[in-house]
Image (tube, rainbow, N blue to C red):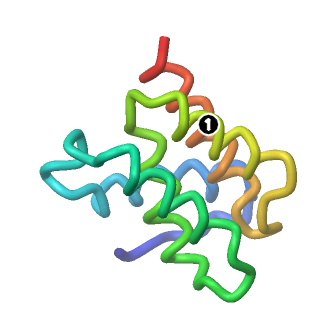
């Protein structure tokens, strides 16, 4: 995915989050609870690449699942510095999906 940076951290985070929707698989709604839990474990591994974390976060954000919401809530307590805005937007989106 290409990205354009504006120099404004908040605007750039929104752009990255919107672009990350392209990472969603067509069958994103068929993720199992076991897969959600596995993704949650991966998300907290320090050595995982940021782009991989973005893919996990965006997928979790689109799940109607208490587990996915809990994982994103926990991640937002201490996100990777580079993913602070991205993680916050994902949590907001997850809250909408889980209303």
Spot the residue most to the top: 99
Please indicate whether residue 10 sits to the left or right of residue 69 in the image.
right
Note whether 49 is above or below 53 in the view shown: below
What percent of the width, then of the height, locates residue 64?
39, 28
Note whether 82 is above or below 69 in the view shown: below
The residue depicted at 23 percent of the width and 39 percent of the height is 29
What percent of the width, then of the height, locates residue 62?
38, 38
Q: Secondary structure at mark 1?
A: helix
Please indicate whether residue 58 sits to the left or right of residue 26 in the image.
right
Residue 94 vs residue 11, the one in the foreground: 94
What percent of the width, then of the height, locates residue 39?
49, 62
Spot the residue most to the front: 34
What percent of the width, then of the height, locates residue 53?
56, 69
The residue depicted at 42 percent of the width and 23 percent of the height is 97
Total marks in image: 1
The quadrant in which residue 95 appears is: top right
Crowding at dot 1, Cα within 10 Å, few <14 / some 14-19 / many 20+, comes out as many
Which residue, given by chain and number where applicable, does mark 1 sit on?
A: 91
The quadrant in which residue 40 appears is: bottom right
Residue 9 vs residue 6, the one in the foreground: 9
Residue 60 vs residue 54, the one in the foreground: 60
Which quarter of the rendered picture does the N terminus lie within?
A: bottom left
Spot the residue most to the left: 26
The residue depicted at 57 percent of the width and 48 percent of the height is 14
Residue 25 vs residue 20, the one in the foreground: 25
Note whether 48 is above or below 86 in the view shown: below
């Amino acid at each position: 995915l290409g990205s354009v940076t504006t120099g404004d951290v908040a605007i750039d985070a929104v752009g990255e989050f919107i672009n990350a929707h392209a990472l969603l698989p067509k069958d994103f709604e068929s993720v199992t609870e076991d897969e959600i839990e596995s993704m949650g474990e991966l998300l907290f591994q320090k050595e995982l690449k940021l782009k991989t974390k973005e893919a996990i976060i965006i997928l979790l954000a689109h799940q109607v699942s208490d587990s996915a919401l809990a994982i994103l809530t926990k991640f937002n307590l201490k996100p990777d510095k580079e993913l602070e805005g991205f993680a916050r937007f994902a949590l907001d989106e997850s809250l909408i999906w889980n209303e």
